[in-house]
Image (cartoon, helix red, strand yellow):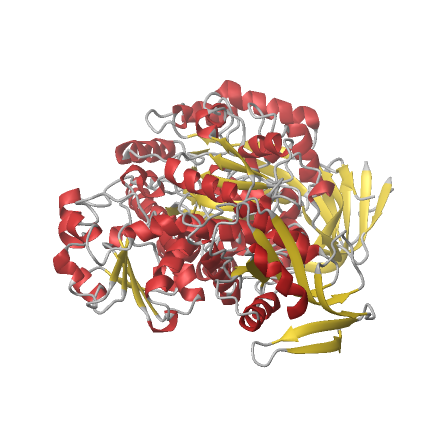
Amino acid sequence: MKIAIRGGRVIDPANNFDTVSDVFIDRGVVTAIGAAPSEFETNSNIDASGKIVCPGFVDLRARLREPGQEHKATMDSELRAAVSAGITSLCCPPDTYPVIDTPAMVHMVRQRAAELQLTQVHPLGALTIGLAGERLTNMSALQDAGCIGVGNALQPVENTLVMRRAMQYAASFDITVFIHAHDSWLLGNGCVHEGEVSTRLGLPAIPEAAETVAVARELALIETTGVRAHFCELSCARAVAMVADAQQRGLPVTADVSAHHLHLTEHDIGFFNTQCHVRPPLRSATDRDALRSATRDNVVQAICSDHQPHEVDAKLAPFSESEPGISGLETLLSLTLKLVADGLLELPRALATITCGPARVLGIDTGHLRVGAAADICVFDPDSIWVVDPDSMLSQGRNTPYTGWSLPGQVCQTLIGGRLVYEQE
Amino acid sequence: MSRRDIQIDEAGNLVHFLTLEGLSQPTLVGILDLAESFVGFETREIKKVPLLRGKTVVNLFFESSTRTRTTFEIAAKRLSADVINMNPARMSTSKGETVLDTVRNLEAMHTDMFVVRHEFSGAAYLIASHVPPHIRIINAGDGRHAHPTQAMLDMFTIRQHKPDFASLSVAIVGDILHSRVARSQIHALNVLGVPDIRVIAPMTLLPTEVERLGVRAYTNMASGLKDVDVVIMLRLQMERMQGQLIPSEQEFFRCYGLTEDKLRYAKRDAVVMHPGPINRGLEIASSVADGPQSLILSQVTNGIAVRMAIMAQLMGGAGRKETS
Amino acid sequence: MESQLRPMLSSDPLFVGIHTGGVWLAQRLCQQLDVAAPIGSIDISFYRDDFSRVGIHPQVKASHLPEPIDDRHIILIDDVLHTGRTIRAALNEIFAYGRPRQVWLAVLVERGGRELPIQPDVVATRMELEPSEHVKLLGPEPLTLQRMERR
């Protein structure tokens, strides 16, 4: 199938490309940008004038709830939501039920996703069996089965020796370790940032130290084991400063931030709004600003949705009893563009954080528009403003704190391997 | 996402009593004044008024408390309301019926007002956000967040003995971290214009950034109690404590327990209060609790009148405004 | 009013005034009639029928009946009788204290506009007023009647 995407502003941050141009696709692959290849008989023209044409988005962390939590969402519903949001590849954490700690589970997830022929799903394997933090998984087998790395999801690895061994072992096979750094003792049963809001609302709190203590420990271990490590969902200024320092010293450390941490703070919780219950918690304005700077300065390489769809009841409980998480796929692009609109990021840098940045962290060959690359492409209208309405969401989880927000950017077309998987009505 | 405080409706009327935060001085003073007319009902020839006749009040106590529940029951009955007591703590919630399901089942019984106590902060707000507009919710204590009726009766008691709030120095001592009473008292004292509000506790029991609530924090009784007019002792919430918050009860009493010696740091005519139930020999020495400066028993007596005033204030209709 | 009330004194009635005008009036009348017995006073705030609509005013004065009323004659005194609802509320409150033998109603001004079947036994003067007009007793010294437009 020969496709031409005509007249759009083509932005490919990986190759520093930003020009109004045409993109030509043949047999699922980008064959040319600019002049049409000779004797190119287009089967399908996509008019992208006034739109932006860029690599399809790579979401570094999205939970699909399958297997095990189908009452919250299924791969079917969530991948449909993903393609409508321009997301062509995503990485799902290993904390499904059962946990992704065996090749069989990896195959299951990959096969199910392949059947749906929508967004490409790259599972993360578990660092330890059952995510219990005690015994290492067969990381090599997991890698061969298709895991792009291993991680501890939201479960702490309390035993420092186990963490060290896990890192050493992963390093032996050049496997990236994805770390959610938090100290379980300081975490306690906290549900909000330890600060003004927790004091006012009388909610059990998570001090910033819960993150910094863990980041410090992991950095020390990373330094001695030489493992390639990625810090997931950093939430506070001090942690980001520690990671920046480690990067400057040459450690192979990357980091991501969840989109909501770039926009919301503890004050958005208001009067116990459970839609703002997330883990790690929303922190202070100073932390949010530091995360924004870190994103701009490439201390943070990726912005992710941290998609966690929930059924209605999960949020209809007293705050500390509600389940944390935001259904974030459908606002990922717009929240990223909002940073540009607010003057905090340049557009190419913003797009890099959801294309080549995460792709490099995951080690997958996508997120760019090099000739010969798989045609995973998103065409979107950057000037189109829409209002967030939970009832219009495609995800089975309608849990969003952005209801009523006017956001920029709507996806017009999404192509995966040259196939049109989504087109806006 | 709305951040409007749901306890005040769009017309400005007080429709729920969830927290004292955000309420105006005239509103609080109005409640205190109304409570005056309900004081002394025990000695009156008639103990009941028909203000809430025909209304049904449900005491929905997810967290047990016979004392508080009984005062609410008496208050509602003195207003001629019908009262139903429910203790879901012993019923189905532990097995999975959600807070909202429990409320919905009771709504179907034509309830006009719920008095709610729950072990988790924000429970009263959750319920108030999901009931039909004619139903009133009174927060009888939610987790660590608020206990507004208790704070109001404490303010009423203070006013009986020291009527000029603008000249007072008030110290709240003890487990501030876990105390919903302390938080509500701090809001009340701020709204009523008390210029010097102090909290005294070891750092482990002081919430982060507590100064932002409008108080000064002290870790030392001698400096914290110096020249105060009112000393409010809080109950040490042993059952709420997780981890090493205080090394032992003995050390706590030695450093922060209110004894006659420590009371001498305060003004000579200072008054002593405690929301109860008191742990003798832990927060407060018996000689002080039973001594001439103690208002602890008045607090108990005033509880009914103040709760009557709050109930009457909420159930009164649309013509009444949240005065601002 | 004095002359109308004098014959009733033989039954040793208890004078009960309704706050605030009725109490002033009761005090003046007892003075003029040489009645030494204490006067009862009633604040009907808690017995009003419009509580659901208008709520409650915080300045409620205590009601006080100085003597038991069972089997007693009561002269209930108010300044203006208009709709009759105030009297209805006062009667309800009186009956919460006990069971009087008889209750007479004495008012300074009776105006039209009754909404309940309530009639005074003693009246000083009758007035016909427009619905937008309003008559009020000011006091305690001097006691004066004021007629005005209700804004």
The quadrant in which the N terminus of chain A is found is top right
Tell me which corner region of the image, top left, top right, bottom left or bottom right, holds residue A188. top left
Q: Identify the residue at horizontal 12%, vertical 59% (top origin).
A: B261
Could you say which is closer to the camera, residue C22 or residue A41? C22
Q: Identify the residue at horizontal 61%, vertical 45% (top origin).
A: A400
Whole-percent x, y for residue C113 in the image: 80, 61
Question: In the drawing, does residue C101 fall left or right of residue A141?
Answer: right
Could you say which is closer to the camera, residue B195 or residue A363? B195
The quadrant in which the C terminus of chain A is found is top right
Residue A39 in sight: no
Q: Identify the residue at horizontal 58%, vertical 70% (top origin).
A: C29
Whole-percent x, y for residue B70 in the image: 42, 38
Residue A399 in sight: yes
Tell me which corner region of the image, top left, top right, bottom left or bottom right, holds residue A183. top left
Whole-percent x, y for residue A294 in the image: 47, 58
Could you say which is closer to the camera, residue A284 or residue A242? A284
